[in-house]
Amino acid sequence: MLDTLITSLLTVLSLHHILYLAGGVFLGLLIGIFPGLGGIAGLSLLLPFLYGMDPISALAMLVGLVAVIPTSDTFTSVLMGIPGSSASQATVLDGFPMAKQGHAARALAAAFTASLFGGLFGALMLTVFVLIARPLILAFGSAELFMLTLLGLSMVGVLAGNSLVKGISACGIGLLLGSLGAAPATGEYRMSFDNTYLMDGIPLVVVGLGIFAIPEIIDLLRQNRAIAEASELGSGWVDGFKDVIKHKWLSIRCAILGTLVGALPGLGGSVVDWIAYGHAVQTTKAKDNPQFGKGDVRGVIAPESANNAKEGGGLIPTLLFGIPGSGSMAVFLGGMVLIGLEPGPAMVGAELGTTYTIVWSLALANVIGAGSCLLLSKWVARLTLIPYALMAPFMLMVICFAAFQATRSLGDLVALLAIGVLGVVMKRFDWPRPAFLIGFVLAGGMETYLYQAVQFDGWSFLTKPGVLIIAAITVASIYFAVRTKPADKTDDTGANTETETAPEAPRRRASNLRPQIIFAIAVVGLFGYGLYDALQHSFLGGVFTAGLCAFMLVMSLIVLVKLLRGRLEDPVNFDNEVEAGYSTDSSITSLPHYVYWLTGLILGCYLFGYLIAIGLFFIIFLLLKARTSMIKTLSLTGAALAFLVVLSHLMVLDMPRGLLQEMVQLPWPLS
Amino acid sequence: MKNADKFLRKFSARAIRPLVVAIACASALSVTTPVLATDFEGARIEMTMPFKEGGGTDTWGRFYAPLIGEQLPGQPVVVVKNIPGGGSTSGANQFQARAKADGRDIFASSGSTMFPYILGDKRVKYEYKDWTAILASPTGGVVYISSDLGVKNIAELAKLKDADLKYASQGATSLDLITLLSFEVLGLDVKAVFGMKGRGEARLAFERGEVNIDDQTTSGFIKKVQPLVDEGKAIPLFSWGVLGKDGKIQRDPTFPDLPHFVEAYEMVHGSAPSSERFRAWKAFFIAGYAAQKGLFLPKGTPDDVVQAYREAIAKAVATPGFSEKAQDVLGDYDQAVGDEASMMFTEAVSMDDEARAWVINWLNSKYSAGL
């Protein structure tokens, strides 16, 4: 084994290998910086070149790309409040408030150092773990995986914010939305209104961007300023580095978590960052002055340590069993087969050398990737000083592009708008969006594994030792969550998960509860409809959503009743329009204003296709909102469109077509 | 907004030049010279792939793309355009609606695209009979059981009648339909547990002991199940077989010692199968195995273009060293080109009404498929 280790280390360190690896890393950096374009987009750009390459070089490029994306996607999470990919959703919660306070460089440095550390530690763990992973993976059957989804859900308690019933209801909305489409047991289509797009369920990318990015963009536009409130960027990147050193144990624990959860096939890496974040919140004692949700650097370190280690973990089921744990791992697997490597038990036998080459490439890619990100961060952090009206059209363009990249249809854009509006409302009334997202991510796995566990073992699956152990961990996790919460004395302190910045100012309370009541009624109605729909299906096709909706009806009714009783000091009462002082500040644009802009853009896509619509949007928005001169407007628009056209050509991606294109034959690229 | 202007001034000085370059590049890309139908020089051929990047059919398509491009007149670039969704019906619908019949649009089809078509899924708006097949890639597969069941080979199949058999499946209308149908035809009472995200996950469930009967395609079986057979944990029962030129099912050359499905049936029932359920099985077998993956040209493609493609593929497949290169992606199966490919797909998609009615009724009543 030591021989193999050394031989593969030498392979990795050869100049030839490093060059290809750096090529992959570079591409990954470029792709990862754009929000929503994750590993899948990068790998599909790379796939056409793999054919005919020698396996080791090809592998180096693949690994370089996979390894760096959870690092570089941190840029948008921290700087814009937009999750760069599903792996860094949790980073937004504290990274973005830090950027708003002018600490973007520090947050980025902490994130990249944590990424580097997590990646390296993950690789180290993998070296040993890959040899003993097989029995462990086999020990996790459907029953145990179901219990893990429950453990994931218990994080909702940590992320629920001020009102637990609201948190649970928000999680319920996510769970219901996540179970849209084909039922795992029977394939019946739930709540899909015979719509082909809804039958497949809404893609995670679209939900992630809609729920986080759209509300953030609209909020910044309404305030009409740059992202950073301070005009100078405060503490530099050395501080971020020191932060990680200070919290090294947290980083180690999260890296271990990341490797283990990443290694379990089926659960997917998209919950790792949330679990790590929840872990950080739970284990931070009140005396350490937790500021989670308001810019606590620990909230950046934890998910970033975990999500890089996760890629290493995710390699285990991919290599050992040929089962990809995530979308990007699926493409990685396809790439492996193309270059003539079929995964299987041999990867820890005769082909152990290749496995170690991959593991150590991963480590090296993390060093190169995090290193270059660290060097870049000082410059990229300056983006937060740009007036947002100039950035917004670019951000919207990229987000829409990333969204329709998910299934290449106009439906993605409509779903983005719908989820975006939901996100705006949830942000306004403080229905915790992280809880929603956790629900959404876990819905599919939870239902599938529960159904399978019952089919395999009957209800006696609940007495399996693995199940009992995970149940005990879940209970402990909830206990810690309750303990860390400083006894809900007022709701200003503690784990406020929303990205508001109103430190210690006396709270303004909303006195007009009607908008909140209307939303609560809509939520109750949603669960009511979900229940109705569930009853239209066969028992196995509807039992999960029926049970879910019945429970959530109770929860959301509690919220509604509390609001109707009109006690203003109740923690369910929250209206950001009042709390942040927007409703009394005449310089703030009204909430629906930019929702209309966005709706206009999507409507334009429906009529004229994406390219023409986004071009018009750029011109009108820049002229009216950013007040740029005609020449600058046109050159910015031209640049943006050129970028879009080149990228979609390289990715072999047709942009959504509108009615215009259906009626008239237009020349490329307008078609 | 003064700030915006100030920033822009600084920004534009540095950024304008690369932008001009980018725009120039973009417009250069958009210039496509008109060419003769059978000369694809400088053209970009788009292979519509109704799946996400990275799956089996995607890998297969990406394997073939450069090989076909090399052999076509003018050596065009063949790129893969992924349009996932609707269990591969979205991409097929889009191809049906938009593909141009000038040889620049080709379609990569898989069993998962054919099944909904055969079953009359309402999402299907494409018509296989409109398209011209230019390539069919077969694959094989093996059904195996856990050694805990105490059955040594297919001859002892009768012992399984009372066993508590469980099979992990992706869904009743997925490719696993063939396997479920086989159990039905053989008279085995197998409980199907759905919701698997691929045959790989199903195999994992087998290894964990959650299920005790499973099937894998040839490559999956050799790399991942054969080690289990060697350890004595798994017992192969039968292979699906391959479709001979005479339309009869023969033993799979990769597994010459294993009986094929029809042999297995004869061992159990003593006679050759002939019912409507067997006819249904055979159509699905062709669509799901014998001609699982295929390339198609759209409706109305001129004959010279079709001919150019057929020749190109025939040449690509006959290139020295092809079968070594193809080993991991295609296995040891003869690739069907030209008329042979057309005939296979014709047989797969033309199931008689009696058989179809039986299958749909069976899927609805046994698995609530809602067809």
Image: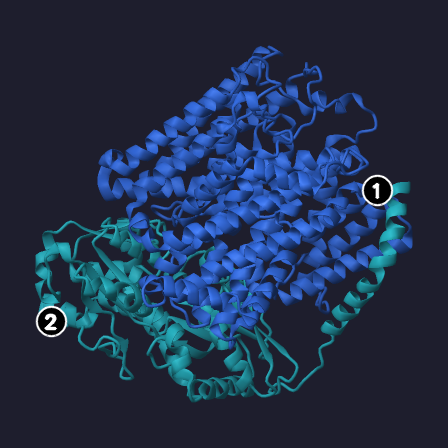
Chain colours: A blue, B cyan
Q: Residue B238 appears in which quarter of the rendering?
A: bottom left
Look at label 1 and name its amino acid: Lys
Mark 1 residue crowding within 10 angstroms, few (<14) / some (14–19) / many (20+): some
Residue in view at x 25 percent, y 50 percent? B208
Disc 2, SS: loop
Quarter placement of the N terminus of chain A: bottom left
What distance separates the C-alpha of mark 1 from that of mark 2? 80 Å
Depth check: A584 or B98 in front? Answer: A584
Mark 1 and mark 2 on one chain: no
Residue A217 x %, y %:
71, 40
Depth check: B100 or A129 in front? Answer: A129
Q: Which residue is mark 2?
A: B271
Mark 2 residue crowding within 10 angstroms, few (<14) / some (14–19) / many (20+): few
Residue A625 has which mark? 1
Q: Is residue A194 visible?
A: no
Residue A121 x %, y %:
48, 48
Q: Is residue A511 left or right of residue A538?
A: right
Badge nearest the viewer, 1 or 2:
1
Look at label 2 and name its amino acid: Ser
Q: Is residue A530 visible?
A: yes
Which chain is indicated by disc 2? B
Residue A420 x %, y %:
63, 39
